Amino acid sequence: MAVATNGVVRVQHGTATASATGQGSQAKATGADSSATAEGTQAKATVQGTDSHATAIGDYSTATVTGDNSEAIATNGTHNTATVTGNDSFAGAGANRELPDGSNNNYNTATATGDFTVAVAGVGGSDNTHNTATAITDGTVQGGPTEALAGVFGSGNNYNTATGIDGGEAFAAVNGSSNNYNTATASGGGIAGASTDGSYNDNNTATATGGSSLAVAGGLGSNDDNNTAIATTVTDSVGGTAIAGYFGDNNTNNTAIVTNGNNSIAQAGGGDGFLSGTPGSFNTNNTATADGADSIASAGAGSDNNDMLAANAGPGETDIVP
């Protein structure tokens, strides 16, 4: 065990190490080959586990690990919080191992709960603030990882929320800049992306539930706002795909819903990613609903200036309103 406070190592036993620099800083590592590093006013790093590591650099930042072979990093800003509870897991707030650089990434929260989980918030750029990433699993879902990324690989991404549950992978405001207030939720092996691969995309919501389901709202373009994609799969087969306001610019207020999806597709506004591969712009207020297996619904996708269109497809049906 190792304990350090205010620049002084107070306890050193075994192979654990601790370092604390700054007024009110605290670092404590318990477990073989574990380490805790705290730098900054009231910075705090705590480890309970073997070969685990916690790094908190920045005023009022906190990194906490409970588990073996895990890591929590809260750096490149102030008031960041990274928490891991589980083995072989990672939480990064403000930075991670692959993207250590950045600045003014403040008030980000990353929480990884369960084994083999990953949560990353406000990473890969600068001025990413108030992003929340939560990855949680009880180990009942087999297969893919449980992962959540919010405000990652860009700058000026704020107030984004990503939640991955039991094998779900959630991405909110990823691979772009100035994307705000986006929400992605994925569970049971689903994948959800809200404002991915684009900039200035706000208030998009993507929800994917069930194995192989995919929901994408806003992104791969600019100024795609207020889009909603919901994909629900009731089996673990092919799954359903819902895409709203994606693949083009200035696509807003589109809604795509897949219900009881199995090899089903709903796309509203934006581009046509499945039929023609054509991007679309200025498509607003379109709605596509695919309800049941092998259904396809497409409204206002793949061309320009399509508004107020609706497509509805039942099991085995195709409804395309271009």
Image: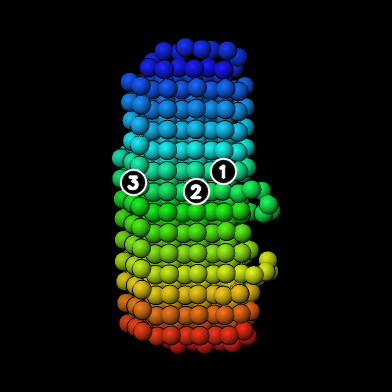
Does label 1 or label 3 sit earlier along the sequence? 1
Q: Is residue 95 above or below residue 223?
A: above
Does label 2 or label 3 sit earlier along the sequence? 3
Q: Is residue 76 above or below residue 155?
A: above
User: Mark 2 and mark 3: span between their CA atoms?
Assistant: 15 Å
Q: Amino acid at mark 2?
A: Thr
Q: In front: 10, or 189?
A: 10
Does label 2 or label 1 sit earlier along the sequence? 1
Q: Please name the residue that numbered disc 1 is placed on.
A: 113
Residue 312 appears left or right of 201:
right
Foreground mark, 2 or 3, reads 2
Q: Please name the residue that numbered disc 3 is placed on.
A: 129
> Around disc 3, counting alpha carbons within 10 Å, would you say few (fewer than 14), some (14 to 19), or many (20 or more)?
many
Q: Amino acid at mark 1?
A: Thr
Foreground mark, 1 or 3, reads 1
Q: Is residue 170 above or below residue 96?
A: below
Name the mark on residue 222. none
Q: Secondary structure at mark 3?
A: loop
Q: Which quadrant is the N terminus positioned in?
A: top right
| Colour style of the rendered protein structure | rainbow
Q: Please name the residue that numbered disc 2 is placed on.
A: 134
Q: Amino acid at mark 3?
A: Thr
Q: Secondary structure at mark 1?
A: strand
Q: Which residue does the image show at 42% across and 54% down from the upper left?
A: 161
**Is residue 183 at all visible to an observer of this figure?**
yes
Residue 51: name its quadrant: top right
